[in-house]
């Protein structure tokens, strides 16, 4: 029997992201905030001063037993995701869990299977998939306006909060989820090179090169050590090109009606081919102002109520974890490309030779 | 016996870049334009209408014999560089040759040896080394103001003139010459992945990852297919960070007095280390307006007259050619890192394994 | 007897601005939200769903009688400010009222007198005076770093909410309050020219020219019809110049260490004086991130608790109303300058002659 | 009998602007540079070193007598324009003279009359009328795409070369010529307020407010004392709005498909009218790269050869001088509006009253 709106929701964790989820749950008519689940008393007190009327529970198990609770939003550190999500699913609760879905492919797969068996919504919180500019670009690709996508570059850098997990697990999930959403293809291979300053185990900067099945490539720069917040992606297609930069007021998305067409025919004296340049307008399309997290929660509610698949679905979350794991393998090596098989598991890695020819 | 100012100069080639060299040679007091050497009559006519008073010679050999000619500026296509530079050096002329110095390491080495034997100036035209913003950043690194350089990212993209040589040979020499100048270190390894659209042999887009000896890394994105002219480099150091972007009026160089310091001590509960963030001002230092090509020609003249080593010296030009050749090896493979030995020659390349474990 | 923290506060009005005041009152420890006063039931309901634990009162008089209420924040339309503020002051409540303090000079003066007699804090909500960039520039002027201020230009334009009061009363108070705060001088004269499109009585665009006592001038452009949000002020001083633009990420304040010094001595042949140009760096100083409204409420609380004069004080609010009234006189004429006497009242206006020489 | 291409041209003056004219005359096939006329020997020498083959004449009268000379380009200081242009016209030469056409209305009118009598082309060098972005915006207005123009704002500021003529005569001609070209209407009135720092007679900063016949207004800020080069104009129309900013790479012209429509019907409770907001895309149309001065010289040649009226025609140049003269009257007063009659002469100025009521 399917739940009815308003859906009873418990938010778990009131650290960095939790307060945003709480605020948006309260604002959405189809959701009702039953309680906050937070062990830390300082955080719980912060919540109570803002929302005098709403309960706080220190104990996670409490919510599992409560029949008013239809769904759980988990905003705790990554290493706790698997355990909390598993318990919630087993208790029959729908789950929205912050990215990454889990810290290992095995755990992520287990959650996906469990949710399927229990016929519950399991949704990783890839909030960028609900950002209006990201959706606009998805629409441009789907409609064919950009033509065939040749490549994507992404720079995501800032002075970051240093996480034990490293910058790749911290920032790259954003780029990976966006790329999987836009290109709608599996990743064929990934190579990653990192720079570490403070701790050899934990790179603060990394450069990823991704090859997608049937063509397009992507280069991703992620860093916690960068001068200024950089949030720029460039998608180059056969017809048009688009730039996405959240830091440009009134111009987060810019479509360049420009390109290069190679003319059939022999090369000229100087080895140059005859090319036609298309140079048209630059358009910054109107982007509706909307809070991505609110749209994400709306999609979560809709999936629970209608059974529709959410845009940020479990399989996409699992693919992100797979690529992250492959990137770690390349990172811990010399940065050679790691091939992902159709199944997603790593089937091969290349070795790098030392001058004497032996394998490093 | 050393030549005296004004030095007699012949410019060879009046295509895309030649007219700029001609204009600047005329403006510099220590140089005197003896003639233009140009086989193409249309180009030669264009020159004559602008400079009625100056000779044009169709034949390269003519200048070799003329005693008034102290130096030659070669602005012809890359494949002609070696032959023309060799002849000029053998005839006892000083040579400024457009980048790249030559199209193979062997040819580049031969020119370097020849110039040394003949005690002549051989200077590759890495004009960016004379760009005031590039020099400003070099000074910031040398003075230690940036601290230890952690990494550099570079994006150099535009709708480019399609060259038979491919985008790496066309654009990467700019980044490589700047990086070698700034970091003043040899390249330890390079990996390159390319995307080709029009011609499988000729990538229009490539992503390079470079490791320099004793530490710093660089990620370079070059493309002929990009929506807009992108010319951005970010240098992240332990003390400060600097952004170089020629497209920002009044802000080509921006110094960010910001950073991240890891505090000694145990990690906190959530696996985060204690960090101190330094967040200071952003400074766009005054950059003198000067035409790089004019400064380059001044350095060329000064090297001839004083025997000083030019900033854009032959060994740097040779190193650029070496890295380009290594990048080509990686490109023609699966993008695995290629190790350069101290000598610069490629001593190893990694292989990529197929699922069956055999080497591809 | 002086009130003690936490101060009991009632917010009046939950339209456009009220929710922001409510949120910040809740966040500030020295303030306690007793209730929201809102006649409109839809608005009241919006409040209740967000803040289940807090009362809503439909009737303004209710709060006047309640001893728990130390202070009132009035966020209702301008035409209601005088009446509500007067009642609150007479009931012995401290008052923070949204700008403008009142719609006429007479009303504003009456409120200032009343607050003085009752020894209560009367504070107009000139929130921009608490914006960190505005404060930074104030500090630059006070410290003498800019030198003598020559002039200020301001553009404040957007697609605005059309108010019956006209764009001058809607937007210019921001510029006037900032200018009075920065320059710390009385306005000597003001001229204003307006453009009206929809309603001859209500200009949507206006250009103001202000002369301040002892020198500096200002030009202010305000419009509801502008393509994009423009929020730019430029302050030119004898030593340095500063640009303030809220729309530039990481660069809301930019200090230009540049200037022009006239050399003593005879003019040259071509009537040009000998000048020295100073051209130094451009600095974007670090600006602390803080919500102006929260700082404003803190200053309000501090004034009540300590008796200190708030930065946005009643006399400044009154001066803003005086200049607005003078601007209206110029607007309703041909745009001739209107002189304000020391007292602030308008002592003269110029007439404009018709071709026949008679006074229009 | 009409002249034939190539037209013989003499450039007069090789100071700041002359070299640009020389370079472009040489590049244009329909023009032939006969000589440079320059009294100053240093300047003449600079010319000769660049253009060995071309004559230099110290004496202006020499060119009047030379039959090879069809046209004269005058690039000398403003105060010399009238005398040189008059002599050239009387000698039957076509004249391109740098802006302003002359320093007084009387002189400008005399030149216009003389050129008409002699049936010669008299063209003021309002180069901005040939700037591709300015033309693009002219086309947008003519085609009706912007709708009815409501107002224009312009900021033209930089650290300027201090001219004895003052900033209004130095910079405002650019804005005035562009406004007259775009709006294609006479100026009805102008008011100007100036700030002077170095010399009471010579304002370095001024604010102009212009009213055009049948409606639109403009506010113009000009200054020699500004931190950075500002070159921004905003044109607000009933349908769309456009921003022109030469300092934005790839975005000199931006068209905002946004607006505000007032709905017929009673105002709402709070005195706000019901409005519809149109919010569409922002488009940066493709602008052809072309050097305005070359297009200007082409138009000059075309006018001589075909008798067509040049875009920058003498009457427009005269109107600019008229408005400048009216602005000076307002400047030298208290900044009151000065009314221009249809004829263009100033028929009235308003007076400003002192507190005692007497006229200042």
Image: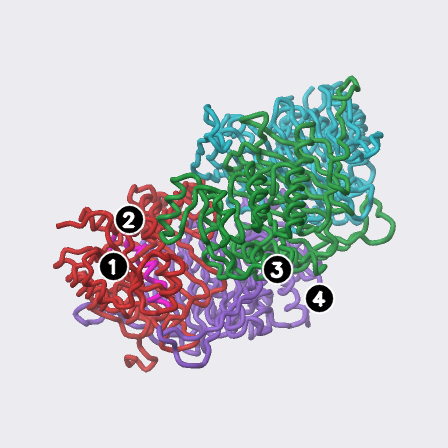
Chain colours: A red, B purple, C green, D cyan
Residue on which the image places disc 4: B4
Q: Secondary structure at mark 2?
A: helix
Res. A72 mark: 1
Residue on which the image places disc 3: C283
| Mark 3 closeness class: few <14, some 14–19, many ≥20 residues within 10 Å | many
Chain letter for mark 1, please.
A
**Disc 1 versus disc 4: nearer the observer:** 1
Give the alpha-carbon distance from disc 1 to disc 4, as whole Å.
83 Å
Residue on which the image places disc 2: A298
Q: Secondary structure at mark 3?
A: strand
Question: Image check: B190 left or right of D64?
Answer: left
Q: Residue furthest right?
A: C266
| Mark 4 closeness class: few <14, some 14–19, many ≥20 residues within 10 Å | some
Do the residues at pointers 1 and 2 share their chain?
yes
Point out the image quarter for the C terminus of chain A. bottom left
Do the residues at pointers 1 and 4 share their chain?
no
Give the alpha-carbon distance from disc 2 to disc 4, as whole Å.
79 Å
Q: In this orientation, which residue lies closer to the viewer: C331 or A123?
A: C331
Q: Residue at x 46, y 26 (%)?
A: D263
Do the residues at pointers 2 and 4 share their chain?
no
Do the residues at pointers 2 and 3 share their chain?
no
Q: Secondary structure at mark 1?
A: strand
Q: Which corner quadrant of the image does residue A346 belong to?
A: bottom left
- Where residue A311 appears, as percent x and y from the top left, is 26, 51
Q: Which residues are magenta?
A: A167-185
């Amino acid at each position: 029997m399917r739940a009815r709106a308003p859906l009873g929701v418990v938010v778990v964790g009131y650290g960095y992201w939790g307060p945003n989820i709480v605020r948006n749950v309260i604002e959405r008519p189809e959701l009702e905030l039953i309680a906050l689940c937070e062990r830390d008393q300082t955080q719980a007190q912060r919540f109570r001063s803002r929302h005098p009327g709403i309960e706080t529970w220190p104990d996670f198990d409490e919510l599992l037993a409560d029949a008013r609770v239809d769904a759980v939003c988990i905003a705790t550190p990554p290493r706790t995701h698997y355990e909390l999500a598993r318990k919630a699913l087993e208790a029959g609760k729908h789950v929205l869990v912050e990215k990454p879905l889990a810290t290992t492919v095995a755990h992520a797969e287990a959650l996906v299977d469990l949710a399927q068996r229990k016929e519950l919504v399991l949704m990783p919180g890839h909030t960028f998939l609900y950002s209006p500019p990201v959706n606009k670009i998805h629409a441009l690709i789907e409609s064919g306006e950009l033509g065939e996508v040749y490549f994507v570059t992404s720079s995501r850098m800032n002075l970051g909060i240093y996480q034990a997990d490293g910058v790749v697990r911290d920032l790259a999930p954003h780029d990976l989820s966006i790329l999987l959403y836009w290109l709608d293809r599996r990743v064929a291979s990934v190579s990653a090179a990192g720079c570490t300053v403070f701790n050899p185990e934990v790179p603060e900067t990394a450069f990823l090169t991704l090859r997608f099945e049937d063509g397009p490539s992507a280069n991703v720069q992620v860093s916690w050590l960068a001068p200024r917040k950089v949030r720029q992606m460039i998608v180059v297609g056969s017809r048009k090109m688009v730039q996405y930069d959240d830091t440009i007021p009134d111009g987060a998305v810019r479509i360049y009606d420009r390109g290069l067409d190679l003319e059939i025919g022999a090369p000229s004296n100087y080895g140059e081919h005859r090319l036609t340049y298309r140079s048209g307008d630059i358009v910054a399309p109107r982007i509706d102002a909307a809070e991505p997290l609110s749209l994400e929660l709306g999609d979560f509610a809709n999936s629970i109520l209608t059974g529709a698949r959410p845009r940020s679905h479990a399989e996409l979350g699992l693919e992100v974890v797979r690529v992250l794991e492959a990137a770690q393998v390349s990172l811990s090596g010399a940065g050679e490309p790691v091939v992902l098989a159709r199944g997603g598991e790593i089937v091969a890695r290349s070795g790098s030779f030392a001058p004497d020819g032996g394998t490093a």
